[in-house]
Every structure is written in C-alpha cells, then in structure tokens.
Amino acid sequence: MARRDDKRGKRDRDEQDEFAEKLVHINRVAKTVKGGRNMSFAALVVVGDGKGQVGFGKGKAQEVPECIRKGTELARKSLIRVPMREGRTLHHDCKGRHGAGKVLLRAAPPGTGIIAGGPMRAVLESLGMQDVVAKSTGSSNPYNMVRATFDALKSQENPRMIAAKRGKKVGDIVGRRRDGADSATAGDSADV
C-alpha cells in the first residue's frame, strides 16, 4: 500500500511543479455567534502553467494556509485553455463582464509587456501572456475583476477556428488582420 501512496504523491508533486499559483486576494471574515465572533479567511487564487492554461478558485477556512490550499484545488479543477498569438499576446481585442465589473483586453505589439491592474495582471501572468493592454471599469472587487477577465478570455478564438466556421482558408482571415495592423511594416519590408 505504501508504494501506491508514494507514486500518487510523486504525481501530485509533478503537477504542482507544472502550475504556478498566485494569491490574488485574502479576506478576513467574521461570523457573529452567541459566544462572540468566529474569524475565518477567504482566499482568491489563480493557477496557470504559463503556456495558455489558467484557472481560479476561492477557498475559505479557519487558517490562511488551508484556505489557500482549498482555493488552489478549485483553481486546478476550473482550468481553461486560451489560444494565444505567437505564444505572447491575444488574437483579437475582447470584452468581458461579470456583475458590475467590466474588462477590456487588447492585443499589443512585442515589447509592450503586461499593462493591467492587480487581479487582471495575476491572471494574465499565470496564463503566460507577455504583451497585452487591459483596462477595467466599474467594480474594482477582485472577484468580479477575475471573473470578468475569464469571461473575456473565453471569447478568444484563433484564426483556425474562425476559418473552419466560415469555410475559408486561414491565410484569408490572417491576411485581412495584417493588412490593417501591419501596413507600416509591410511598406518597410518592400523597400529592402
């Protein structure tokens, strides 16, 4: 029986090494009862592999490490895959919304970096994004911001998916995008 537990423990450690976890927000909450107040903690955790997979979870417990562990477990169960262009940015601009929190994510040229606020930055860094510009409006509640960011990321589609839906070639879809965005660089390359 000990061997089976050792193998399972090793597999769990390998999974933990693969995913990086970020603590976005921790909140101390109190429940008033007859004898006084019961204190507990709530943690919002984002987990990602840096290669296009990301998830978030909320944990609640009497101790901080325990609530972080619970949040991490939930985050691993709620992973989503997000298609990225050149492994560094978004394919297209997108909007997300949850409650009163609204988020706008925009693709950016190489070297821009991640320009985003706290909770959105944690999600985008865990995802492995390198160049993106983000703006949040409305609610600054971290839970709403993270959920709105996930709503925006779920709407991302890569050119292959769009081409398959429309019955066109990938080159037609990507070519149109490049005509508008990279017209300045196309002129420079023609001169050389």
Image: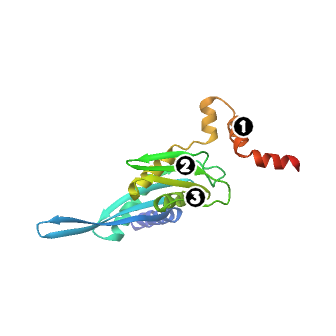
Quickly name the residue at label 2: 82
Q: How many marks?
A: 3
- Mark pair 2, 3: CA separation: 10 Å
- Pick out the residue farthest to the front: 138
Q: Look at the picture and state if 171 lies above or below 167.
A: below
Q: Amino acid at mark 3?
A: Gly
Q: Residue 128 has which mark? A: 3
Determine the secondary structure under disc 3.
loop
Instruction: Give amino acid for label 2.
Output: Val
Quarter of the picture containing the N terminus is bottom left
Q: Position of residue 62 (x, y in %)?
A: 27, 68
Front residue of 74/132: it is: 132
Q: Residues within 10 Å of mark 1 (few under 14, many from 20)?
A: few
The reply, left or right, for residue 123 in relation to residue 5 is right
Mark 2 vs 3, N-terminal side = 2
Closer-to-camera residue (154/55): 154
Residue 171: numbered disc: 1
Q: Residue at x 67, y 30 (%)?
A: 168
- The spot of residue 7 in percent (x, y) is 46, 64
Q: Residues within 10 Å of mark 3 (few under 14, many from 20)?
A: some
Residue 157 visible, this orientation? yes
Mark 1 to mark 2: distance in Å?
21 Å
Q: Residue furthest right?
A: 192
